[in-house]
Image (cartoon, rainbow, N blue to C red):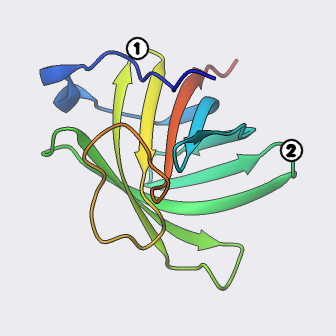
């Protein structure tokens, strides 16, 4: 399978991302450099919370998120709130970019000390996800 190709770089428009609120379905994903299928829907809420729905397992996880719009690429910090007690409080650092209805998010491994610097993964890194906006009716 060919490597996942992220959407075109948005350059200076990166800092103009004003919102990622809403539901986003994973359409492509790499984990540690290899393609994986993740039937996930991320639902970003206005109060800085995000629900991650695993449609295959029928489970949901809750995170707190914050965006750092002063950085290029835009940075996101996710903090796990539950339901697994062992993981509660762990953080994932990531970067993201948006092109219309496509959001590309690269997340490092939980509790990594540095943000990813590129939209790619390796054998020892986290996830690169392409997400499509899911309009609500």
Contact (Cβ within 8 Å) of mark 2 with mark 1: no
Q: How many marks?
A: 2
Query: Closest to the observer: 80 or 114?
Result: 114
Disc 2 designates what residue? 56
Q: Residue 47 at what x, y percent from top left?
A: 44, 53
Label 1 crowd (10 A; few <14 / some 14-19 / many >=20):
few
- Mark closer to the observer (2, 1): 2
Label 2 vs 1, first from the N-terminus: 2
Q: Residue at x 68, y 84 (%)?
A: 85
Residue 74: horizontal and vertical position, in percent?
25, 41
Q: Read off the residue under disc 1.
A: 100
Q: Is residue 5 left or right of residue 135?
A: left
Residue 15 location (% of width, % of height): 17, 32
**Residue at the bottom extreme of this rendering:** 86
Q: CA distance from mark 2 to mark 1?
A: 27 Å
User: Dividing the picture into quarters, in which one does residue 133 lie?
Assistant: top right
Q: Quadrant of residue 88?
A: bottom right
Quadrant of the frame with the C terminus: top right
Q: Secondary structure at mark 1?
A: loop
Residue 81 image position (x, y, % from top left): 58, 72
Q: Nearer the viewer, residue 47 or 117?
A: 117
Q: Answer above or below: position of 88 versus 134.
A: below
């Amino acid at each position: 399978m060919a490597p996942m190709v992220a959407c075109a770089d948005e350059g200076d428009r990166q800092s103009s991302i004003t919102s990622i609120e809403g539901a986003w379905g994973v359409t492509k994903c790499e984990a540690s450099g290899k393609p994986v299928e993740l039937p996930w829907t991320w639902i970003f809420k206005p109060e800085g919370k995000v629900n991650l729905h695993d449609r295959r397992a029928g489970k949901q996880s809750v995170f707190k998120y914050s965006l750092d719009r002063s950085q290029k690429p835009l940075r996101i910090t996710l903090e796990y709130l539950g339901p697994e007690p062992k993981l509660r409080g762990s953080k994932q650092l990531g970067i993201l970019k948006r092109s219309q209805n496509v959001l590309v998010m690269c997340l490092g491994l939980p509790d990594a000390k540095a943000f990813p610097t590129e939209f790619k993964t390796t054998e020892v890194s986290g996830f690169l996800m392409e997400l499509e906006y899911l309009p609500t009716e």
